[in-house]
Image (cartoon, grey):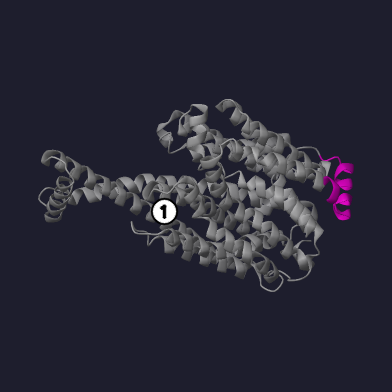
């Protein structure tokens, strides 16, 4: 448990950095003298670098040792975090974020492999439960912490906070964590067999993931395929994908084992994690946006909306870890997906009168569902995987979470944009001078503004402005509701996907061969 705590805490900080800057983007843009659109690259560059780093983590961990590689990644993450805080301009900040993402991406899969080796199979679920806190709670804490820091201190401390924490973690891990004897033997054989680094495969995989992230993140802003930039990036993405599959299938030690992804067990877990990442990241992105735009919440209050779910997760996750030795992962994953679908359905009851606790309760439901998924999917995905492939399996599952998150954000962006236009056009059709309700609304609003001192002509203009504002607000509500409906459908579709997984041997070595 001590080993788990030591390696999980840096991962907590790494995952935290995927969301901590979200609510601070206006402050970052103002501090560096750039638009919020330009400042959003702070998020994009980190995700791209993170996904790229994940693909090479399996080879580097086996070649240089898990502990050594983890420490190098943690040191790079810590140093680059400090550089982010002292960045004088946007290009410098983006370069530091790339380095931060490269360091952070290597820590997550290696930490899971360290935990898997530290526990006997029958206790492994408890270790993954503690690790699950880092993965699930950190993205929830990020907006709250980032909003408070940006509101009360400065945006630079969203990054500088990693400095002292990283130094302490480096010292503790260097003293307390060691590679397991079985992994030492695996590494010895790996070096003796002189496995070379698949440079071409790495470039193809990194190019595919990087361009996919850029396409998904910038597509709507650049008007998708009406933009030459998006056409070029998407073409590179497609070409690298088509070249990547035959190249990787022909390698004895590929950067990504597509045969593993094509199996029933691991492939289903990979797709399931794509869906889970889409829901987790997109809700963390858009629920604070909803309450800030439509309810006037501050950045700190918007972050606090997510907190009840994080608290519930932290409280129940140890018990769920113990359940993994008694309940089949596929049933836990199906239950988690069903609860998540209900949480998304609950938010579709959104209205202008919705309170803080309306949103808080939806996060509480989600706080029950997501731990069931994250802990059990780790156990299920490792079933049948050879010990020398566990690093790759962990890297792919974590990459699925990032890719799924990007897809979820892109999908939600498009739904919001297009459904906003749709609902506005439908409501405008009934807003006409001949409609009795419209006439009554204009009359009442005009009378209200006259009663508050406005001249009749100005009061009528104010009334028209108020109705237009309310129309846009209602269209915004309806478009957000459409987003949550789609996320609910994705969650519900994951239930049968979980049930096709095979049974695993509980409390025995079958979890990882």
Judge whether residue 244 is colored magenta. no
Circle 1 packing at 10 Å, graded few (<14), some (14-19), many (20+), is: many
The residue sitting at 71% across, 51% down in the picture is 9
Instruction: Name the side, left or right, on which 411 lies relative to 68.
Output: left
Relative to 177, is 75 above or below? Answer: above
Q: Is residue 390 visible?
A: no
Instruction: Name the side, left or right, on which 145 lies relative to 33.
Output: right
Q: Looking at the picture, how far across and down is residue 310, in whole percent? A: 57, 58
The residue sitting at 58% across, 68% down in the picture is 499
Instruction: Name the side, left or right, on which 19 lies relative to 178.
Output: left
Q: Looking at the picture, how far across and down is residue 18, in whole percent? A: 59, 44
The residue sitting at 25% across, 47% down in the picture is 425
Judge whether residue 182 is colored magenta. yes
Specify the farthest residue to the bottom. 326
Q: Which of 451 and 417 is in front in this view?
A: 451
**On the image, numbered disc 1 is attached to which residue?**
483
Q: Which residues, given as a range, are shown in magenta?
A: 174-195
Rendered image quadrant of residue 454: top left
Q: Nearer the viewer, residue 506 or 424?
A: 424
The residue sitting at 46% across, 34% down in the picture is 36
Specify the farthest residue to the left. 434
Q: Looking at the picture, how far across and down is residue 111, in whole percent? A: 74, 51
Relative to 15, is 272 above or below? Answer: below
Relative to 299, is 377 above or below? Answer: below
Q: Is residue 69 visible?
A: yes
Q: Which element carries disc 1, helix, strand or loop? A: helix
Q: In which quarter of the image is the N terminus?
A: bottom right
Q: Looking at the picture, how far across and down is residue 68, in whole percent? A: 82, 42
Magenta highlight: main SS: helix
Relative to 402, is 102 above or below? Answer: above
């Amino acid at each position: 448990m001590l080993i788990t705590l030591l390696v999980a805490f840096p991962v907590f900080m790494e995952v935290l950095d995927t969301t901590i800057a979200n609510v601070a983007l206006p402050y970052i843009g103002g501090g560096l003298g750039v638009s919020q659109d330009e400042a959003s690259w702070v998020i994009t560059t980190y995700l791209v670098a993170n996904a790229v780093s994940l693909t090479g983590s399996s080879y580097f961990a086996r070649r240089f040792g898990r502990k050594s590689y983890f420490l190098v990644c943690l040191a790079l993450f810590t140093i680059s975090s400090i550089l982010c805080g002292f960045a004088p301009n946007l290009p410098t900040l983006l370069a530091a974020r790339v380095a931060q993402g490269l360091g952070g991406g290597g820590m997550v899969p290696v930490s899971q492999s360290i935990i898997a080796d530290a526990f006997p199979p029958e206790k492994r679920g408890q270790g993954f439960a503690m690790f699950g806190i880092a993965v699930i709670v950190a993205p929830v804490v990020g907006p709250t912490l980032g909003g408070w820091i940006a509101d009360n201190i400065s945006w630079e401390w969203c990054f500088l906070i990693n400095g002292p924490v990283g130094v302490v973690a480096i010292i503790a891990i260097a003293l307390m964590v060691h590679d397991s004897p079985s992994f030492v033997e695996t590494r010895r054989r790996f070096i003796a067999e002189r496995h070379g680094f698949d440079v071409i495969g790495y470039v193809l995989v990194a190019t595919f993931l990087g361009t996919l992230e850029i396409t998904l993140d910038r597509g709507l802003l650049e008007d998708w395929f009406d933009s030459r930039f998006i056409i070029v990036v998407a073409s590179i993405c497609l070409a690298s994908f088509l070249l990547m599959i035959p190249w990787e299938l022909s390698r004895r030690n590929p950067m990504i084992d597509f045969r593993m992804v094509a199996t029933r067990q691991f492939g289903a877990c990979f797709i399931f994690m794509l869906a889970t990442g889409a829901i987790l990241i997109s809700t963390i992105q858009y629920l604070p946006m909803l309450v800030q735009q439509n309810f006037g919440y501050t950045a700190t209050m918007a972050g606090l909306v997510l907190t009840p779910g994080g608290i519930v997760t932290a409280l129940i996750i140890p018990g769920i870890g113990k359940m993994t030795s008694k309940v089949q992962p596929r049933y836990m994953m199906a239950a988690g997906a069903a609860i998540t679908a209900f949480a998304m359905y609950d938010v579709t009851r959104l209205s202008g009168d919705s309170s803080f606790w309306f949103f808080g309760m939806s996060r509480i439901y989600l706080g029950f569902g997501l731990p069931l998924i994250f802990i059990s999917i780790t156990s299920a995905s490792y079933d049948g995987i050879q010990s020398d492939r566990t690093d790759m399996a962990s890297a792919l599952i974590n990459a699925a979470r990032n890719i799924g998150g990007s897809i979820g954000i892109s999908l939600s962006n498009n739904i919001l944009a297009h459904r906003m236009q749709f609902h506005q056009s439908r409501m405008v059709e009934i807003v006409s001078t001949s409609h009795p309700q419209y006439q009554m609304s204009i009359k009442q609003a005009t009378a209200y503004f006259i009663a508050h001192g406005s001249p009749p002509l100005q009061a009528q203009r104010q009334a028209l402005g108020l109705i237009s504002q309310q129309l846009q607000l209602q269209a915004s509500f309806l478009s957000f509701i459409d987003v949550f409906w789609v996320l609910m459908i994705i969650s519900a579709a994951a239930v049968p996907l979980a049930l096709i997984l095979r049974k695993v041997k509980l409390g025995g070595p079958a979890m990882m061969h």
